[in-house]
Structures are given as structure tokens and as C-alpha cells.
Amino acid sequence: MEIRSSEFLRRVREVRPLVHHITNYVTVNDCANICICAGGSPVMTDGEDVADMVSISSATVVNIGTLNGRTVDSMRVAFSTASEKEIPMLLDPVGAGATPYRTETAEMLMASRPTVIKGNAGEIGVLSGLGGDVKGVDSYGSSDVASAVESLARATGSIVVATGEIDYVSDGNVTYKLENGTDMLGNVSGTGCMLSSVVGCYIGAFGRSIGAVVSAVTAFNVAAEMAVTRCDGPGTFKPALMDAMYNMDGESLDDRARYEMA
Amino acid sequence: MEIRSSEFLRRVREVRPLVHHITNYVTVNDCANICICAGGSPVMTDGEDVADMVSISSATVVNIGTLNGRTVDSMRVAFSTASEKEIPMLLDPVGAGATPYRTETAEMLMASRPTVIKGNAGEIGVLSGLGGDVKGVDSYGSSDVASAVESLARATGSIVVATGEIDYVSDGNVTYKLENGTDMLGNVSGTGCMLSSVVGCYIGAFGRSIGAVVSAVTAFNVAAEMAVTRCDGPGTFKPALMDAMYNMDGESLDDRARYEMA
Amino acid sequence: MEIRSSEFLRRVREVRPLVHHITNYVTVNDCANICICAGGSPVMTDGEDVADMVSISSATVVNIGTLNGRTVDSMRVAFSTASEKEIPMLLDPVGAGATPYRTETAEMLMASRPTVIKGNAGEIGVLSGLGGDVKGVDSYGSSDVASAVESLARATGSIVVATGEIDYVSDGNVTYKLENGTDMLGNVSGTGCMLSSVVGCYIGAFGRSIGAVVSAVTAFNVAAEMAVTRCDGPGTFKPALMDAMYNMDGESLDDRARYEMA
């Protein structure tokens, strides 16, 4: 399958999907801003009006980065509402494997069959049952990431994304290997969360589409490649990343995109 | 009435008002920082010491961007404490009209008769009863914003601000139309919240004063006009906006200020 | 004692300590990012998995900037777990002295005998019993800061840091006076919180070491001196501070370090 990322980019900006988030309080502001820069409109709520807000949204993104009893309940409501109304949903299982509470919460949420599960290689390794190495909320890899994404995609019916130096995306049938990006992404807290918001915009516009997910990850990573040439370190990289995402033109994106079937 | 924004700016910096906030966890950091850049001193607390903290503050800002049962209780305490002690208070009814919970919470808080109610055109349209169009936390306007601010100001006794391409400020008797600003403000999450913090500083220094409110909105919008010339996109716009607010000189402010009675 | 800050810097980067935080929702993102730039790996959790996460961390940082009943319970668990497992812990008693709830919470947490207590001069003055002047979460000094840090260090067994134009660090026996820094730090919300995260990295790598604490404060302040020459105001100062911390070389650090026994 040939994926023209520029077409996905254009369409997301046209649709301007409303993307509901329940995400962690560490990186939530960056998620909101990258969502706007990617062409979406973010809304964050984890209180009594979760179901009402999810119901009017184009997609919902649930990130368990800072979870507690109250917000886990809200996450459950967000996903059950999205399931019922067939609204695309993304799960970012931050820190699954680091503590039992996180692993269990991720597994509970996976039971709602999210459209996309996006984690780093360690988290996806843990959830796939193939094993992964997770310390805190940072991952130190999984021995065979391509197998892990494929296996988890088959088990769940979700499109699965595992990030790392190389990113993998699988729907259980086809698996892509994505090579864009920069090491600088690892020096900023929440770039994984930001990527989840971008993917949330794309599934908000396209629903369950592996082309949309590959395009979302590629657009974000290409923006990061551009930003790293315009910064002096992690501090100035983050605003440059926002700018690059906002200013992305389709032609540059297609020229720089590097992915292939794994 | 002639309003010299430079005089208000100078005085806020002299007073350095302590501005208590209960605001959303998405944009709270930007609120704290713009408050400092505007000349105030921010404090955020929504826990058991809300009443104590409000009591020593010059103003309190309540923003319902991410609300839940616990924080709504704290908002109620903040406003009742402020009422009792005659401390200026601002309500930012984020997302009123998007979900019933938000509309009801905004209405409950309006009953405390806040000094200022500041929302976007859609939220103010909804709260005025004249109708507005709200999706998520972004507004898509109200047919007649000038009427909405005036009507809501009369009904509540508050000074009412409705933001949009053009901003309107009314105390029920006089209505101002403010023309400063830049579209880039719409590309950054929380610029409305940041404006509420700036207005909070001004009412913290001046109490109920339409001149102070007009000056606060104008200072923020002029800073935005300056910042947009020094950025490459939404990412670098935000730090440039902070810098411009911090470096604002009274002469440039008065030169660039554009408002008139509506 | 001669302290070579460059040696501490090098070692922290080698160890890459996992630093658990329970901190306020205002400045938490900056804490995560400065932690990475200082050489650590941040993790924030205040939910049901606090004890599990603290148990795998190199240090825990507790900051009471935005506290409520739920998070105070989590703070207690974090410190009791750290005590039991002999994991270094830092307390940042934000706003102690401003409200009784904050003072009492700080005192409750001090009973766990944190490795480091770091506050501004007013907070440390209050907690030492020598008196301090605190308004909101900003401090207006203490008459005799050197005495306050020494006295509090003796009473608690903690290494105590009091920040201000000049910073003081004491273990009860030796007290250092640290002269690096810039006034611009006072124009950005959360620079005190960020410093706590940096100190958290250093005690995560070194345990209870006054040399590590002095080096952490000095590295942060030298980064701030470098950043202030590369910014136009508080907005661009913050990313420049991150960059400077990340790019810090040991030689420049040793050259610029200015501290002496008080």
C-alpha cells in the first residue's frame, strides 16, 4: 500500500477533529498544543462530564501517565462511551510494566478494544506478553518489536504502534517500519504523549486506518527532524517542534517520509 | 471615557497583586507565568486551604476548564470567601454550553456575582441567554456579541468580556469594542485562560473598574501583536508573548491601543 | 571541603537516576524536563501505585505546591516508603507559612526526616522557627538565613537549602553560601520547583551528600546565568535554561561556580 502522508495531513486540517483527552497532568499542555498544530481541536476533561464531552468528539485519547482511582473511572467511562457511539479511541499505556497498577489499568482499558494502542517498545512488549523492559515511564526496549506489535494487534484487533529509535505500526496483517525521527525526542518529557494526540487527530478524521496512523507518526517525526535543526537543546526543541508541525507542508512531508513494510 | 492603558500597567506593576487561581491543569503553567509577566504574583491552590489563600489574595480567578466534583467545591469556597471579604473575583466559564455540567457550574458560580465574567463569544452567548455556538472548549461565535455582553452585564452586575476576533467589554452601561490582537492567539491552547489571569491582576490592583478590564485585555492583545512578529509559529509565539508582556512599555501600549465605545 | 561540581555533574549523567516526584500541577512539566536536562529520568505518580514506583526509584521529590487531601496521603506514602527502603527524599515545602494547612503538611512530612529540605528563605525561616515572611507561595526573606538553615538542619538531620538572592546550604555542621544565579529566576513560575528536581537527581545518584546538593544548586544557577544572556525575557528564558542545563560542560561549571563556607 502506498501511503501519501500529504493527503492525510490536508484532510486532518480540513476536518479539524475535536479530540477529547484524558491524559496526565505532566504533559497535558504540550498535548493540547501539538493537537492544534496538527490540525485538531483539543478538549480535556476527566470530570463528571466525560461522557457528554466524548459524545461530541471525533476521537478520544486516554493516557495513563498519572492515574488515580478517580481518573481511572473517568477513563473507563470515556472508552465505554466511545465504544457505544463508535468514536475512535486511542490508548497510551504509559508505564505499563513498571507497576502492577499501570499494567492492570492498561489491560482493563484494552478490553474496550481501542482503535489504536500506542506505547513505547517496552510497554508494548509487556502488553503483548512477549516481554519488555520498563523502568519508571521510560522504556528500554523489547527484543523483537515487530513481533510484539503484530502479536498485540492480532490479540486485540487494535492498530498497534511501538515507538523507539525505529517505530513499528501493525494492524495484525501488515506491519510498517518507520524510520523518521531524531534522538532529541528522548530528551523532552512527553513527546510520546504528544504523538498520541497527533494520532488522535488522525483517527478522529479517518477512523480506523493504518494509513492514517502511519501518516500521523511520520508527520510528527518529520516535524521533529526539522525542529532539531532549529534548536540549541531540549528547551528550544519543543517550541520548534510545535512550529514545524504547524508549518508542515505536504510536499516536504512526502519527500522526507521513510517507511516500509517490515 | 478616556482610558490610558499605560497608567493601569504602571500601577499593576507597583501593586504586584497576589492573584489566587483555581484553573485547569492544561494551561495553569502559562497562567502563572503570564501573571508574573503582567506584574502580578500568582498562587494556585484548590485544596483544603482555599479559603485561607483567597483571604490573603488581591483577587481570585476561577476557570472551569477541567472541573470535577472536588474542584467545583473548591471554586464555590473561593467565590464565597471572596464575596464575604470583598475580594475581586473573575469567572472564566470555559466550555459553558458544551456540556450541561459546565453550563450549570458556570451558572452556580455566577450567582456569587463575580466582578468579571470573561469567556469567548460562544460561552458568553450561552450564558446571556442570547445563544452561542460552542464545540468542546472552542467557541464559534455568537450572532450579536455586543448585545450579549451588555445583556449579561446587566443581568449579573458583572463586567463582562467576550473574546473573539474583536473583543467586547461591558459593565451594562457602557460597552467597549477592542480591536487589538492577532489570529495566532487561536493557535495556542490557553490564551483565553492567560487573558483571565491578566485581568485578574488588574482587578486585583483596581477592583471593579471597566477601565482596568479594557486596559488588561488591550495590554495582552498588544503583547500578542508584538510577539507574532518575533515567532515562527505557535510554539515560539507563546514564549514571545510572555516576553512582550514582561517588556511592555507604556508608551508603545498607548500608541497601539485600539478600542472605542461600541 | 573542596567541591568539584564537574565531577558530580558527570556522575549524575552516568547514573541517570530515576527520580519520582509528587509535585504541583502548575510546574510539573518544567520539573520533568529539567530533570532530563540535568541527567535524570523523571517519573510522576501520586495515585495508587506510589509505593511501587518509589520502590524502584533512585530518589523521591515531594513538593506541596498544590496539595489536597488525596495528594497529601500520597506524599505520606511516598516518604514512608522511601524511609523504609532508604531511598533519598527531598521535601519542597512550597507556601509553608502562607496557610496553616501548608505549614502543618510540611511539618508532618518533615517527621519522615527527608534527606533534603529545600525552600525559599521565608519558608525555611518559618520551618526553622526563626521566623520568615511568606505571602502566597513567594517568600520575602528571613532576617538571618544562614542561621535558619543551620538550625533547621540540626533539628531535623536533613541537609537544608534556602534559596534567595544568595542561597544557603547546611548540614548542621557546615554551611555554604552560594552566589551564582540571576534575578530572572524570580520572573518564571516554578524555578524553585525545578531546582528541587535537579537536587533530586543529585541525591538520587549520591545519597546524602552536601557536596552533591551544593553542586546541584550551583549547576542550576550557572545554567540560569548562561540562559539569561540568550533570552529576551521570562518566556524565552525558560527554554534557554533547559538548553543550558542540558549543554552544561564541566569546565565552564567549575570556572563559574562561586560558593564558600558561610
Image (cartoon, coloured by chain):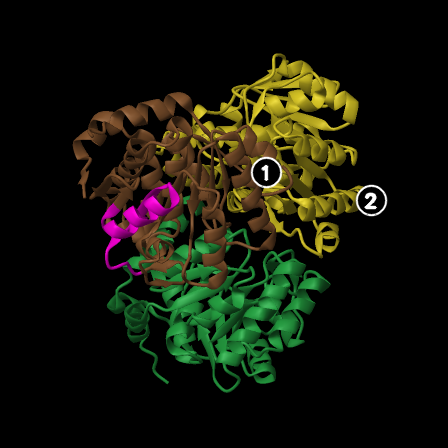
Chain colours: A green, B brown, C yellow
* Residue type at tag 2: Glu
The residue sitting at the right extreme is C84
Q: Which residue shows up at 24% across the image and 42% down it?
A: B175
Q: Are marks 1 and 2 on the same chain?
A: no
| Percent position of residue A226, x then y | 33, 57
Residue A59, located in which quarter of the rendered image?
A: bottom left
On the picture, is B262 further left or further right than C40?
A: left
Q: Nearer the viewer, mark 1 or mark 2?
A: 1
Residue C258 position, x and y percent, is 54, 20
Separation of residues labelled 1 and 2 (CA atoms): 33 Å
Image marks 1 and 2: residues in contact by CB distance under 8 Å: no
The stretch of residues the image draws in magenta is B140-167
Q: Is A116 placed above or below A32 here?
A: below
Chain ID, mark 2: C
Query: Residue at left 60%, top 31%?
Result: C95
Can you say whether C251 is above or below A57 in the image?
A: above
Left or right of A112? Residue A20 is left
Q: Secondary structure at mark 1?
A: helix
Residue C216, visible in the rendered structure: yes
Q: Residues within 10 Å of mark 1 (few under 14, many from 20)?
A: many
| Image quarter in which the C terminus of chain C is found | top right
Q: Does the image show residue C137?
A: no
In the image, what residue type sits under mark 1? Answer: Val
The circle on residue C84 is 2
The residue that label 1 is drawn on is B50
Toward the viewer: C178 or B170? B170
Q: Is residue B127 magenta?
A: no
User: Is B195 on the left-hand or right-hand side of C137?
Assistant: left
Position of the N terminus of chain C by quadrant: top right
